[in-house]
Image (spheres, rainbow, N blue to C red):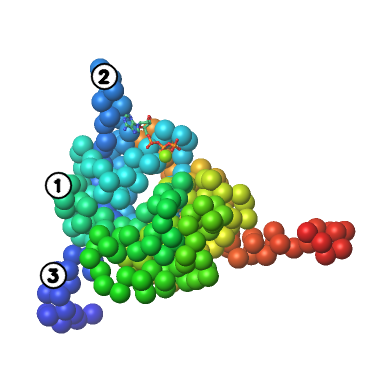
């Protein structure tokens, strides 16, 4: 097929239009513990395309959080190349990393990490304040509506359930429309129904085009994603598409079905 010359020029002008969203090559992280060196990441190669939904699994200490911290520009590798949206970030300074974090990354943590004395709405506005965005309240309100909390805007974290707090954290992660959402054990502190509700939101966001990278140690949670990357001793030992994918909406419907013989009671 013939490609017009100006189209070729366009494609080269914007590296992100051709390469993967995330491109890691030989990413290595060494922690110095006194005399000992601990190899937390050992030459990790990983590509993630826009629109993917990836689970990172592996035993405790295998390097999952270390990898997430580097992908999220919270930390820099000791060796290797990391390109986000076509930009090499492994060598940026703290100031530049903070700017990339604010613009391109949405974080969701196991412990929610909300500001305690602050309402849901204000919590979601925080990244917009750093990003000096206008119409903050409106954007925060829309993000909270997307996670089903349009009626909890003025509630403080202590006035919300764990699952609701995590939904506020997801609203805070998506309000800036990041290139990628990073979630480290987002369901780790939640019971099974609340976990499914969180996975339902992630699946909906992914269906709408969001790219998500999520750490979990639960195989049943990983099966909601589209691809699984398994780690051991700082290396990726397996990288596969998820075949029999679970849909959170179906899991929730099943959990809410009355038990046989309970005459409709729960
Ligand atoms: N700041 C640090 N200083 C020294 N060693 C560290 C540091 N952070 C992590 N490590 C070590 O690096 C290795 C990888 O840690 P990491 O937190 O990435 O594991 P993980 O897979 O997230 O584990 P978990 O499932 O328990 O959260 C571990 O052996 C850990 O002890
Ligand atoms: Mg961890």
Q: Quadrant of residue 128?
A: bottom left
Marked residue nearer the N-terminal end (2 or 3)? 3
**How far separated are the C-alphas under marks 2 and 3?**
46 Å
Under circle 1, the secondary element is: loop
What is the x, y in percent for residue 82? 23, 49
Coordinates of residue 247 in the picture (x, y in percent):
58, 63
Residue at point 32%, 60% (across, down):
126
Image point (20%, 39%), residue name? 79
Residue at 46% across, 39% down: 58
On screen, 131 above or below 81? Answer: below
**Mark 2 falls on what kind of element?**
loop
For disc 1, the marked residue is: 93
Image point (48%, 50%), residue name: 186
- In the rendered image, the residue lying farthest to the top is 35
Query: Is residue 247 found left or right of 64 in the rendered image?
Result: right
For label 3, the residue is: 13
Which structural element holds mark 3? helix
Q: Residues within 10 Å of mark 3 (few under 14, many from 20)?
A: few
- In the rendered image, the quadrant that contains the C terminus is bottom right
Left or right of 2 in this view: 122: right
Instruction: Locate residue 225 relative to residue 10 in the image: left or right.
Output: right
Q: Which numbered tag is attached to residue 34?
A: 2
- The residue carrying mark 3 has its beta carbon less than 8 Å from ligand 1: no
Q: Quadrant of ligand 2?
A: top left
């Amino acid at each position: 097929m013939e490609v017009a010359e100006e189209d070729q020029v366009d494609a080269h002008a914007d590296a992100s239009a051709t390469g993967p969203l995330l491109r890691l090559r030989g990413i290595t992280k060494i922690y110095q513990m006194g005399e000992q060196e601990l190899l937390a990441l050992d030459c990790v190669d990983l590509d993630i395309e826009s629109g993917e939904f990836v689970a990172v699994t592996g035993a405790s200490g295998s390097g999952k959080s270390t990898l997430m911290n580097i992908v999220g520009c919270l930390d820099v590798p000791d060796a290797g190349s990391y390109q986000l949206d076509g930009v090499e970030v492994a060598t940026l300074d703290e100031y530049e990393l903070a700017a990339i974090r604010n613009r391109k990354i949405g974080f969701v943590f196991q412990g929610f990490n909300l500001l305690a004395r602050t309402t849901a709405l204000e919590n979601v506005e925080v990244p917009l304040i750093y990003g000096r965005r206008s119409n903050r309240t409106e954007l925060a309100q829309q993000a909270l509506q997307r996670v089903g909390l349009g009626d909890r805007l003025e509630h403080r974290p202590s006035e919300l359930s764990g699952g609701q707090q995590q939904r506020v954290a997801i609203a805070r992660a998506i309000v800036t429309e990041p290139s990628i959402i990073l979630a480290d054990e987002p369901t780790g502190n939640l019971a099974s129904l609340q976990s499914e509700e969180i996975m339902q939101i992630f699946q909906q966001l992914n269906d709408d085009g969001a790219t998500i990278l999520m750490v979990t140690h639960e195989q049943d949670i990983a099966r909601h994603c589209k691809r699984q990357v398994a780690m051991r001793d700082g290396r990726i030992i397996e990288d596969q598409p998820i075949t029999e994918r679970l849909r959170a909406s179906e899991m929730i419907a099943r959990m809410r079905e009355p038990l046989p013989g309970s005459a409709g009671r729960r």
